[in-house]
Image (cartoon, helix red, strand yellow):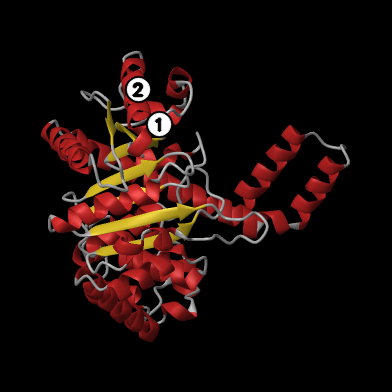
């Protein structure tokens, strides 16, 4: 860690730290900027004072992109991007989310600095929408999105599509399914590939949410892939979790056992129109009865089951009223803020897991020692458990 980053993270002033080291603030400033390299005894003092966070390598092996001129150019780009984002520029928003989703090291470093300059906005509403393929998630989001825009709100949609295991690509067709919403100046739709990430969301969905909030979007929908019971990760990113059902979707009591239903804050029976209205009413009634035997996903909240016709925009007002009342109650009892604080911690650990997985995929699996272990497992000369332990020990020894 660079000394400047350490001082900023721990809110220590240059004057205070220079006093602890027994040097002048001017000398410390020169060390921080890279103008001068500290003597060995000063480096050791810094190592001790920072509990090993700032090592000698952080002074003696500066990377090219961290030299003064490049640093200034990066800072200018970060400030410009943040300014454009906060002004509501869709172009800047699209570019920033592209950086967020990039796997390039330089892009990751840049987007990290951008995100650090964005403030958390607790005045937005994050809505998770899930359901089986064909339930009408995109049509529902378009219908409620247009309804909200008429109320003077800005609406954003993060739509997640499954990635191909063969090519790694995704269809990303949600923009074409939301024809009216996608061309509305007060809406922003961003399809993203799941990139093999379980939980029905993309790896960088949380970062994208932060960008959307900075750009002034009041209501953010996260539309999951709709692939089944694994997509509960979206619950840890939103303020309210909606599960869409088809009329006469099968055994209601069996459906209640699914983890995804148990996490729902609101169940919506979609496509309640034409000859399906009666069937939708039966589905609604049966789910309401079945929900009486389940637990509550959130404190002091009873799950409800509502009907709507996304095509005819019927029931949308009732659903939005439920969402508004739900968020209000959550804020009144402070659970809204506790939930978001908890999500920050989960986001942090998710980022750590992603970083470790990338390190394993890119580096560890290519190591000669690991390849030898892998070959022994393949030939059944070594147990999987012993092999796992050996690789973990190798990882810890070489990377920490």
Q: Which residue sits furthest bottom? A: 69
- Crowd around label 1: few <14 · some 14–19 · many ≥20 (10 Å): many
Q: Which residue sits furthest top? A: 293
Q: Residue at x 42, y 22 (%)?
A: 256
Q: Quadrant of residue 345?
A: top left
Q: Residue at x 34, y 83 (%)?
A: 73
Residue 327: percent from left, percent from top: 18, 38
Q: Quadrant of residue 366?
A: bottom right
Q: Could you say whether the residue bearing mark 2 is in a helix, strand or loop?
A: helix
Left or right of 394 in this view: 260: left
Left or right of 192 in this view: 20: left
Q: CA distance from mark 1 to mark 2?
A: 8 Å
Q: Which residue is mark 1?
A: 247
Report if residue 20 is visible in the image.
no
Q: Quadrant of the N terminus?
A: bottom left
Q: Quadrant of residue 296?
A: top left
Compared with 60, 336 (above or below) is above
Q: Are marks 1 and 2 in contact (CB under 8 Å)?
A: yes
Q: Nearer the viewer, residue 63 or 312?
A: 312
- Crowd around label 2: few <14 · some 14–19 · many ≥20 (10 Å): some
Mark 1 or mark 2, earlier in chain = 1
Left or right of 261 in this view: 341: left
Residue 315: percent from left, percent from top: 23, 39
Residue 219: percent from left, percent from top: 23, 52
Residue 307: percent from left, percent from top: 29, 33
Q: Could you say whether the residue bearing mark 1 is in a helix, strand or loop?
A: loop
Q: Residue at x 42, y 69 (%)?
A: 99
Q: Nearer the viewer, residue 29 or 354?
A: 354
Report if residue 189 is visible in the image.
yes
Q: Which residue is mark 2?
A: 282
């Amino acid at each position: 860690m660079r000394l400047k980053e350490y001082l900023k993270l721990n809110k220590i002033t240059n004057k205070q730290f220079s006093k602890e080291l027994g040097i002048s603030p001017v000398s410390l400033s020169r060390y921080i900027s890279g103008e001068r390299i500290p003597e060995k005894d000063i480096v050791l003092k810094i190592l001790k004072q920072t509990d090993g966070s700032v090592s000698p390598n952080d002074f003696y092996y500066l990377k090219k992109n961290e030299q003064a001129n490049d640093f200034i150019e990066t800072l200018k780009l970060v400030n410009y991007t943040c300014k454009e984002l906060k002004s509501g520029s869709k172009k800047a928003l699209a570019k920033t989310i592209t950086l967020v989703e990039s796997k390039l090291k330089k892009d990751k470093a840049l987007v990290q600095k951008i995100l650090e300059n964005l403030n958390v906005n607790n005045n937005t509403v994050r809505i998770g929408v899930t359901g089986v393929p064909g339930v009408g998630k995109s049509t529902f989001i378009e219908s409620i999105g247009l309804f909200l825009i008429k109320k003077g709100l800005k609406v954003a949609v993060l739509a997640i599509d499954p990635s191909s295991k063969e090519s790694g690509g995704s269809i990303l067709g949600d923009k074409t399914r939301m024809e009216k919403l996608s061309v509305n100046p007060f809406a922003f739709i961003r399809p993203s590939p799941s990139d093999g990430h379980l939980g029905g969301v993309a790896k960088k969905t949380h970062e994208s949410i932060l960008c959307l909030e900075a750009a002034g979007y009041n209501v953010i929908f996260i539309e999951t892939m709709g692939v089944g019971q694994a997509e509960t990760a979206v619950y840890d990113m939103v303020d309210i979790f909606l599960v869409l059902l088809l009329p006469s979707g099968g055994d209601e009591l069996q459906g209640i056992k699914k983890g995804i239903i148990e996490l729902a804050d609101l169940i919506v029976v979609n496509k309640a129109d034409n000859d399906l209205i009666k069937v939708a009413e039966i589905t609604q009634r049966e789910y309401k009865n079945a929900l009486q035997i389940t637990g509550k996903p959130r404190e002091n909240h009873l799950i409800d089951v509502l009907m709507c016709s996304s095509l005819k925009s019927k029931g949308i007002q009732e659903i939005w009223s439920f969402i508004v009342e739900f968020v209000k109650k959550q804020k009144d009892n402070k659970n809204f803020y506790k939930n978001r604080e908890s999500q920050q911690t989960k986001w942090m650990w998710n980022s750590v897991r992603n970083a470790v997985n990338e390190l394993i995929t890119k580096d560890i699996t290519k190591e000669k020692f690991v390849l030898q272990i892998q070959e022994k497992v393949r030939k059944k000369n070594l147990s999987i458990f012993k092999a796992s332990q050996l690789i973990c020990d190798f990882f810890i020894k070489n990377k920490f």
